[in-house]
Amino acid sequence: MQISPSILSADFANLERELERVANADWAHVDVMDGHFVPNLTIGLPVVEALVKVSPIPLDAHLMIEDPDRWAPMYAEAGCQSVTFHIEAAHEPRALSRALRAAGARAGMAVKPRTDFAPYAELLPELDMVLVMTVEPGFGGQSFMADQMPKVRQVREAVRRHGGEIWIQVDGGVSADTIEQCAEAGADVFVAGSAVYGAEDAAAAVDELRALVTSHAH
Ligand code: DX5
Ligand code: ZN
């Protein structure tokens, strides 16, 4: 069970210090938004390259961008140890996943709340993680969509049938109130932005979230 705090809710003027605050987490989740795939704009490759150099923990890049086929491998080459693209934006997801792995990253595929997983189950052999969004991507601090839990169960079942070590990540509205139902449905990597960076002691919030799900290990 792994916790990946989203720096979207961190102080963008002090990102190195903000990463140090969550050094006890498993990953640092970096939300890349291009103002096209989602109606928000955050950071891109030059900033991510700088973060890789100073981060005490590996980076988990979540690319909410058009044309990930072109751009995503560069995030792997920059040193992000996990790179997740949105299936809604990918042209050749199989080739893209292979390119991510060839560049040394874990390959992740994200699905938006209104995107079904079933048509993409055949991609599992190419993937190291499936991200089930529990909010519409674009902004931090939105309400958790419990209606995505059946999809998490469905992905868990497909992963079980397939075998191998494929992680299931949830992202959006994950907090002490909602994390247990995610774990119970089958998630094992938990992104939390406002629940971690909104806390006075971010590291304690990470530990608290992890403690809530440890007993649910899959
Ligand atoms: C939303 C981002 C999330 C966001 C989560 O599009 O992908 O990673 O930072 O923030 P919270 O945990 O506040 O919902
Ligand atoms: Zn995210």
Image (tube, helix red, strand yellow):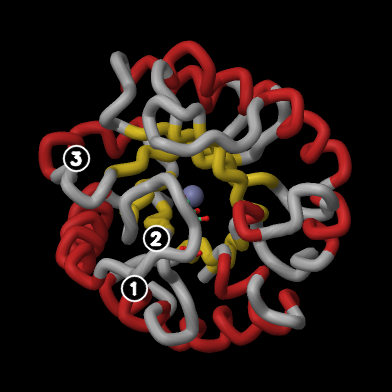
Q: Amino acid at mark 1?
A: Cys
Give the percent coordinates (x, y) of residue 149: 22, 68
The mark closer to the camera, 3 or 2, is 2
- Dot 2 and dot 1 residues touching (CB under 8 Å): yes
Residue 141 lies, in percent from the top left, at 47, 65
State the image quarter where residue 6 is shown.
bottom right
Measuring 15% from the left and 66% from the top, which residue is drawn there? 150
Determine which of the numbered discs, if any, sits on residue 170 in the image. Answer: 2
Evaluate whether residue 164 shows in this view.
no
Is 162 drawn above or below residue 71 in the view shown?
below
Instruction: For marks 2 and 1, give the CA distance.
Output: 7 Å
Q: Residue at x 49, y 18 (%)?
A: 99
| Local secondary structure at mark 3 | helix
* Mark found first going from the N terminus, 2 or 1: 2
> Label 3 amino acid?
Ala
Q: In the figure, 144 relative to 37: above or below? A: below
Labelled disc at residue 81: none
Instruction: Determine whether the beta carbon of the residue marked 2 sits less than 8 angstroms from the nearest atom of ligand 1.
Output: no
Helix, strand or loop at label 1? It is helix
In the picture, the disc for residue 121 is 3
Label 2 crowding class (10 Å Cα cut-off): few <14, some 14-19, many 20+? many
